[in-house]
Amino acid sequence: MNIPKKLKAWILLCRCDQPFIETPFAITAAFLTAEDSIPDIKKLICIFFACFSGFMAGCVFNGIADRKIDAVNPRTKDRPVASGMVTVREALCVMVFCIAVVIVSTWLIDPFYVLLLPIPIGLCLVYSLTKRFTWLCHVCLGVANASIPVGTWIVYNGWRDWRALLAGALMFFWTIGIEIIYNSQDVEYDKNMGMNSIPVRFGLRFAYNLSLLCHIAMAVVLAALIYFAHAGLIFTVGSVICCCILVYEHALVHGLRKENADKIFNLSQLFSFLLMVSAVLDKLVYIHI
C-alpha cells in the first residue's frame, strides 16, 4: 500500500484540505455573542470539534452516496471513493467516527443538546440525496449550515436571544448563493444523469441572478448583525472586505462563465476565514482598550 497516496485520499475524502468553510462561522458567532469578554474556551473547543467533525461526516457521506455518479463524471472521477482509493466500508467507518466525535463534543457542552443532534446531522447527510428528487437541495444545505451559528449562539446566550436567527440567516443565504454557483459547473452532466439543482431546473442566468440576490440578502443580514451585536470597527471593516470577495465571485461568473465556478470554493474559504479573524480581533482589541 502506498501510504502517502492513501493518506492523501483520506484527507481529500474528509475535505481536511479545505477546513475554512462552515466551522469559522461557529467561531465568529461565539465571539459576537460575548460582548464584554472572550467566549468560554472549553465550549469553543468543543464547538470547533463538533462542527468540523460534522462537516467531515457530511463530506464522507456525500462521497459514498455519489460514488457511482462521480465515477463517470470527468471532474469528479478521481475522488477517493469513486476512484476506489477508499472503500465504502472504510468511508463508513470514518463517517461513524466523525459522528461519534460530534456527539461527544456536544455532550461535553451540555447533554441536553445531544437530543437535538439528529436534526442538523440528518440535514447534513440528507443533502447528498435531495438532489436526486428536488431542485431545492441547496436550501436543505443552507438550513443545515444555518444550524451551526444558531447552535453556537444558543450555547452561549440561551434560547431567548433572537440575534441567533440573524446569525443563522447570514449563513443560510451565504450557503445557498455559493452552492448555486459551485453546482453550475456540472449543469449539463447533471441534466444527463437526472440530477436536480436550481441551475438545471431554471438555467444558468436565473441561477446566477438568484445567487446574487441571496448574497445581497446576506449583506443586509450581516449589516443588521453588526448593529444588533454591537460589533466594532474591525469586524465592520472585515465584513466589508468579505462582501467585496462576494462581488468578485459574481464577477467571475458574469456572462454565464461557469468554467470559473470551480474557483468559488477557495474564495468561500477566504470569506469565512476573514470573517472569523475579524470577529476575533475585534473582540480582543475591544477588551484590551
Image (cartoon, rainbow, N blue to C red):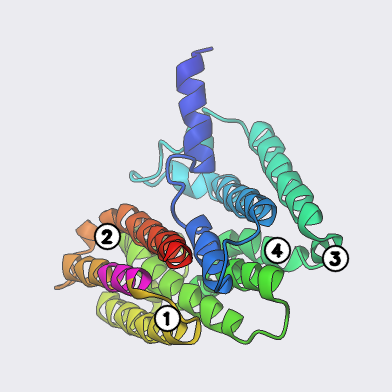
Q: Amino acid at mark 1?
A: Ile
Q: Which residue is mark 4?
A: 122
> Which element type, helix, strand or loop, lies under badge 2?
helix
Q: Tell me how far mark 4 sits from mark 1, CA to CA.
A: 31 Å
Please name whichever residue, 52 or 157, is drawn nearer the observer in this view of the structure.
157
The x, y position of residue 223, in whole percent, is: 38, 84
The amino acid beneath tag 4 is: Gly
For residue 53, above or below residue 114: above
Task: Tell us which disc is closer to us: 3 or 4.
Answer: 3
- Taking the image as shown, residue 229 lies to the left or right of residue 260, namely right
SS type, badge 3:
helix
Residue furthest to the front in view is 289
Main secondary structure type of the part rendered in magenta:
helix
- Quadrant of residue 204 within the rendered picture: bottom left
What residue is shown with label 3?
A: 112
Q: Residue furthest left?
A: 255
Q: Residues within 10 Å of mark 2 (few under 14, many from 20)?
A: many
Nearest-to-viewer mark from 1 and 3: 1
Q: Which residues are magenta?
A: 234-242
Q: Earlier in the sequence, mark 2 or mark 3?
A: 3
Q: Is residue 252 above or below residue 206?
A: above
Q: Are marks 3 and 4 in contact (CB under 8 Å)?
A: no
Question: Of circles 2 and 3, which is in front?
Answer: 3
Question: What label sits on residue 105 in the rendered view?
Answer: none
Which residue is identified by label 1? 226
User: Residue 91 location in percent, x, y?
Assistant: 64, 37
Which quadrant of the figure has residue 97? top right
Residue 15 colored magenta? no
Outermost residue, top direction? 1
Dot in front, 4 or 1 = 1
The residue at the point 22 percent across, 72 percent down is 247
